[in-house]
């Protein structure tokens, strides 16, 4: 049986377009090339070669002459072939790999990465437990993919032995507003658009990306519902967080009246327009929620004497607390929050009926819109 020759391939810079490529020959001896990135993204050949490691593993996957696999090589392969499709999730994974994991473990062979060493490394990191849990999760995914690609012996994932102390616990309790505090906050927001945004956020419990992803076509005025079906993060249109997040929500008549009033005021009122279309880009994209949080919501919270940690997620936590205050059944709360589950019992005993959902939602709206 003929032994396959291990291919290192070559990394070269096409100076006509300032772009790095990885070049190799396939089984038929045909020359192939894969784009690695621009010179701006990869300013040195050393960085381009590190990115090429994932492709090098792929082209040699069927060979019998395989060298030891370093963590960075399989991590690059994972980023190229297996990264989550949702943009924000992929960005988080990539940041954890590039900023934390590869600098520490990139040059270590997979077989030499021992759980005890990783456990002690996590103990030394000056990050919150939740951040460490995210980093560990990405490392686990890379090991899983290495086993899938037969680049690491199939076995129990080494990251299963690593424990993050208080990894599922919050360091601080989330801020929840009372109806009176929310009304006070509205008074310090500078314009109707900002007031309407946060009102919709607290009346529907939407995430910031989902709030900004609303279009007028998502509203069914006849049936008083809205379909949450997309998110916008950093001017990128993306899917909602989970399959449970894509859902029709009930609209209270008072909220319908407020939204239709805003539509009449807005210069962007066609069905295909964003509800919160930004005039700074002629309505092509919605407002940037982080800028609104830092420039308007937090200063308003501080002026209202509510502290300086009021943000978009405050309104989602507040919505959840107010639902509880209405004594809405937990199945109703789960569906209105669009969670995968609140507790196992909630999944086993099924979803809430539409009318209880509407009643619970309306009770929260009446706390906001009198």
Image (tube, rainbow, N blue to C red):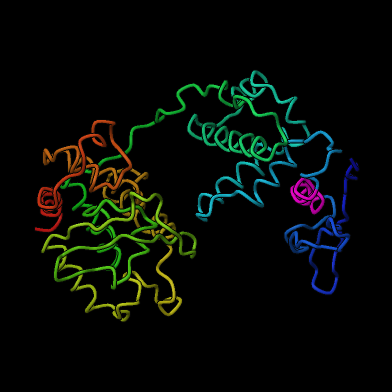
Q: In which quarter of the image is the N terminus?
A: top right
Considering depth in this image, is 145 or 46 the residue closer to the camera? 145
Q: Residue at image x 33%, y 37%?
A: 174
Q: Is residue 170 above or below residue 213?
A: above
Q: Is residue 139 above or below residue 32?
A: above
User: Residue 172 vs residue 117: left or right?
Assistant: left
Magenta part of the chain? 47-59
Q: In this view, does 159 lie above or below 198?
A: above
**Spot occupied by residue 27 in the image (x, y as percentages of width and height):** 84, 55
**Spot occupied by residue 223 in the image (x, y as percentages of width and height):** 14, 66
**Spot occupied by residue 370 in the image (x, y as percentages of width and height):** 8, 58
User: Residue 16 vs residue 236: left or right?
Assistant: right
Considering depth in this image, is 335 or 256 the residue closer to the camera? 335
Quarter-of-image position of residue 322 = top left
Considering depth in this image, is 124 or 177 the residue closer to the camera? 124
Quarter-of-image position of residue 66 = top right
Quarter-of-image position of residue 240 = bottom left
User: Residue 240 vs residue 333: left or right?
Assistant: right
Q: Residue at image x 84%, y 36%?
A: 67
Q: In this view, does 246 lie above or below 283?
A: above
* 49 inside magenta stretch: yes
């Amino acid at each position: 049986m003929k032994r396959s020759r291990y291919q290192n391939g070559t990394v070269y810079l096409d100076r006509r377009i300032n772009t790095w490529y990885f070049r190799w020959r396939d089984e038929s001896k045909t020359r192939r090339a894969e784009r690695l990135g621009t010179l701006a993204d990869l300013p040195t050949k050393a960085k381009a070669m590190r990115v090429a490691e994932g492709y090098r593993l792929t082209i040699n996957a069927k060979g019998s002459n395989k060298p030891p696999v370093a963590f960075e090589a399989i991590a690059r392969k994972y980023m190229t072939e297996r990264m989550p499709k949702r943009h924000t999730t992929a960005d988080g994974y990539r940041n954890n790999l590039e900023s934390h994991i590869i600098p520490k473990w990139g040059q270590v062979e997979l077989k030499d990465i021992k759980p005890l060493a990783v456990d002690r490394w996590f103990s030394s990191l000056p990050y919150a437990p939740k951040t460490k849990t995210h980093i560990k999760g990405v490392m686990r995914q890379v090991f899983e993919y290495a086993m899938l690609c037969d680049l690491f012996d199939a076995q129990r994932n080494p990251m299963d032995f690593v424990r993050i102390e208080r990894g599922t616990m919050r360091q601080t309790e989330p801020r929840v507003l009372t109806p009176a505090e929310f009304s006070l906050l509205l008074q310090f927001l500078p314009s109707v658009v900002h007031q309407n945004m946060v009102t919709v956020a607290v009346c529907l419990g939407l995430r910031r990306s989902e709030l900004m992803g609303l279009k007028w076509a998502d509203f069914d005025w006849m049936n008083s519902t809205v379909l949450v079906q997309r998110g916008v993060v950093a001017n990128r249109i993306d899917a909602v967080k989970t399959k449970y997040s894509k859902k029709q929500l009930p609209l209270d008549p008072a909220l319908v009246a407020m939204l239709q009033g805003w539509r009449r005021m807005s210069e962007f009122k066609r069905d295909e327009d964003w509800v919160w279309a930004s005039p700074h880009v002629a309505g092509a994209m919605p407002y940037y929620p982080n800028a609104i949080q830092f420039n308007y919501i937090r200063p308003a919270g501080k002026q209202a004497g509510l502290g300086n940690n009021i943000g978009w997620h405050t309104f989602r936590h507040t919505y959840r607390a107010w639902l509880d205050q209405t004594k809405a059944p937990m199945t109703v709360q789960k569906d209105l929050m669009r969670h995968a589950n609140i507790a196992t019992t909630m999944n086993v005993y099924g979803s809430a009926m539409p009318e209880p959902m509407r009643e619970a939602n309306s009770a929260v709206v009446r706390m906001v819109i009198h």
